[in-house]
Amino acid sequence: MENNQNILQDSFGRKHTYLRISLTELCNLRCTYCMPAEGIPLSPKSHIMNFDEIYTIAKTFVDHGVTKIRLTGGEPLVRRDAEVILKKLATLPVELAISTNAVIVDRFIETFKSCGIQNINVSLDSLDAKKFNQITRRNDFEKVYKNIQLLIDEGFNVKLNAVLIKGFNDDEIIDFIKLTKTLPVAVRFIEFMPFDGNKWDKSKMMSYAEVMSLVNAEFDENDVLRIADAPNDTSKNYKIKGYNGSFAIISSVTNPFCDSCNRIRLTANGQLKNCLFSSTESDLLTPLREGKDIKPLIKKAMQAKFKIRGGMDTLEKLEEPKLHSKNRSMIAIGG
Ligand code: SAM
């Protein structure tokens, strides 16, 4: 590892070892909390990283200490050359993982296996077909549910990500947890976060504390077990005694985990984001195409990383539309 420059350490001493790469801004779902109804202005195709560029940038990060890469989007699997990209990245000495909505995941089982991908995060916001179709603006519930079962049967570690929206799916929290009685999955409840154009408001957000009070009202307190969080984990993990799976809460809004943040993000058009919430980005793709060394740019971007949530260090600042609307929509960041 060429670690002589420590380019992935920020000014607060945090080392960034986890890179999330968005493969595309396109998606086969239209989740209301993720993208505006009118869609987003897409980058011209020529501005999207090709597979060689993805590999070259990823390799630079891996050479400097990145040990885990998660592919995301948009929906990473709708990219035509998704399989080629996965196979190329699998040659790097890195743990590869993927976040997907699982609509077409059945076509990739063998590719995942040959690439050594074991950890798959699947978005699933409702267990009710009608509600699922309503929030995703598509009718794919049955396909997704079947594909989740397929992933489990094929031996993958599956996490189900549910974004909680009050009045929409908060009545399903207990149903989701009960699913883990038999299914060996980790259900992760995500606090609804504000991004450009997603009509966020605090009253729609279900907080960590609110989720736990529902859990504690439903289950005997001796049966709700707090289990170990993995290092740099963004989630607080729990399990119901005797259940096969587990559940967790990702509390980016009420309880940010910035102190132990080890994440950086590369958008599909080659912009480095040093934080999910940052309103600024560093272009790596243009200089790469010009044959320039991107390492000094990466170092500069890491040095500019704020201590907390892209500088929105209080809940009041996060709630201020003028601040969070400077960020992209989630669809174009890659959650
Ligand atoms: N298409 C893939 C998928 O469905 O997982 C990857 C991209 S998606 C943007 C990644 C994750 O971001 C999903 O779990 C999604 O639910 C989450 N997400 C999107 N918008 C969000 C928001 N406003 N608040 C919290 N999570 C959000």
Image (cartoon, grey):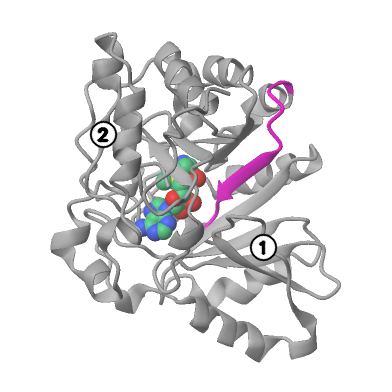
Q: Which residues are magenta?
A: 114-125
Q: Is mark 1 within 8 Å of ligand 1?
A: no
176 or 196, nearer to the observer: 196
**Res 135 seen here:** no
Residue 68 location in percent, x, y? 59, 36
Identify the secondary structure beneath mark 1.
Answer: loop
Taking 141 as reference, is 23 left or right? Answer: left
Residue 279 location in percent, x, y? 22, 49
**Res 154 seen here:** yes
Taking 318 as reference, is 11 left or right? Answer: right
Q: Label 1 vs label 2: CA separation?
A: 31 Å
Q: Is residue 216 above or below residue 328?
A: below
Give the residue displayed 61% in from the left and 36% down from the top.
97
The quarter of the rendered structure image containing the N terminus is top right
Crowd around label 1: few <14 · some 14–19 · many ≥20 (10 Å) = few
Residue 37 location in percent, x, y? 24, 50
Give the residue displayed 64% in from the left and 52% down from the top.
159
Taking 285 as reference, is 264 left or right? Answer: right
Q: Is residue 208 above or below residue 35?
A: below
Residue 193 location in percent, x, y? 36, 62
Q: Residue furthest front?
A: 4
311 or 107, nearer to the observer: 311
Which residue bears the numbered disc 2?
282
What residue type is disc 1 on?
Answer: Asp
Which residue bears the numbered disc 1?
229
116 magenta-colored? yes
Give the residue displayed 45% in from the left and 33% down from the top.
21
Give the residue displayed 47% in from the left and 61% down from the top.
259
What residue type is disc 2 on?
Answer: Ser
Q: Residue furthest right?
A: 242
Taking 243 as reference, is 237 left or right? Answer: left
